[in-house]
Image (cartoon, rainbow, N blue to C red):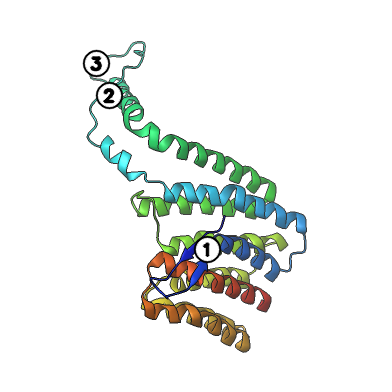
Amino acid sequence: MAETLDVSTAVPGVQVRDVWPLVPIVALLGGAWAAQSADLTAVAAALALLLGGWRPFWRVLTRTDWATPLARWRHWERKLALPRWPYLQPETPGAALHHTLEQARSWWHEVGREPLALPLRRAALALVVSLLMGIVGGRYALLLTLCLVSLAEIAALWHAGRGRVGIGWQAAAGVGLPWLLGASLGGSPSLRQALAALTLTVFVALFAAPKPWAVGGPLVGALFLISLGHFSVAGMLVLLTLPGLHLLFHRPPPAVYRRAVAPWILAALMLVAAAL
């Protein structure tokens, strides 16, 4: 459920409703609209893949604190006995593996099970749903599913499993890949659709960061539209981003700023979809 966030610390008297969870949905629908896909069944299946598979898997892998329990494993020495394997000889690779498994069992029961059991179950379920829905959706849906899974794993490893990832990773998983998924519903995504997905990923990654380079997001989007001959749409895109850029002068916290610019990002996605 969307939450109302008091951002009075950034702009006195302003309240912002969090619509950021709608960004992947609008990106998918925008890609389908731009590709002129009128198959409502395929769109519904893509939404089911996004909401039932991709998003839960991404949230579990990138928001779970894997690092804290795994840090204790590095110096773990206690063991929990396992049944002895037949013909196991001392000082052999099999004995070393058996010893490691006994340590892992002890670590899991004492440290790992409580914080990691539920996330692992959720990740496994979301992965199964993603793969099954990807197979049903066809080769492009399956290929993009594998890309999303790989991206989530790389993002989590890049940030050492601390339970948070940068806005660039979020833009790729929440805008670029959903846009391509929507575009694939009308057949093979065209080069224009691929460039649109890349441009929108860069646009969101820059614009959603409360830094001076946020202005680069609208510029990248405008240049892409101008290259396609959509001069008036490029101007409208820049105008849509002005409220968010103005908010930078108040130096809001990153979470506050991202929630504040989310409605303008939604509008920008729909504007680009309509232009294409």
Instruction: Give, as a three-letter code, the residue at label 2.
Output: Ala
On screen, 187 above or below 148?
A: below
Q: CA distance from mark 1 to mark 2?
A: 51 Å
Report helix, strand or loop for mark 2.
Answer: helix
Residue at image mark 2? 96
The residue positioned 51% from the left and 80% from the top of the image is 241
The amino acid on which the numbered mark 1 sits, given as a three-letter code, is Asp
- Residue 240 point in image, percent of width and height: 55, 81
Where 243 sits versus 173, above or below?
below
Q: Going 54% across and 48% down the picture, which residue do you hit?
A: 56
Measured as percent of width and height from the top left, residue 163 is found at 38, 50
Residue 112: x and y in percent read 36, 34
Disc 1: CA contacts within 10 A as few (<14), some (14-19) or many (>=20):
some
| In the foreground, 163 or 147 | 163
Badge 3 element: loop
CB contact under 8 Å: marks 3 and 1: no
For disc 2, the neighbor class at 10 Å (few under 14, some 14 to 19, many from 20) is few
| Residue at mark 3 to residue at mark 1: CA–CA distance | 60 Å
- Residue placed most toward the observer, 254 or 123: 254
Q: Earlier in the sequence, mark 3 or mark 1?
A: 1
Q: Residue furthest front?
A: 13
The quarter of the rendered structure image containing the C terminus is bottom right
Question: Would residue 13 appear left or right of 100 to someone viewing this image?
Answer: right
Q: Which mark is residue 253?
A: none
Q: Is residue 247 left or right of residue 276?
A: left
Query: Of the numbered discs in the image, which one, if any, rests on residue 90?
Result: 3
Q: Secondary structure at mark 1?
A: loop
Identified at 32% across, 32% down, the residue is 111
Look at label 3 and name its amino acid. Answer: Pro
Label 3 – label 2 distance at C-alpha:
8 Å
The residue pinned by badge 1 equals 18
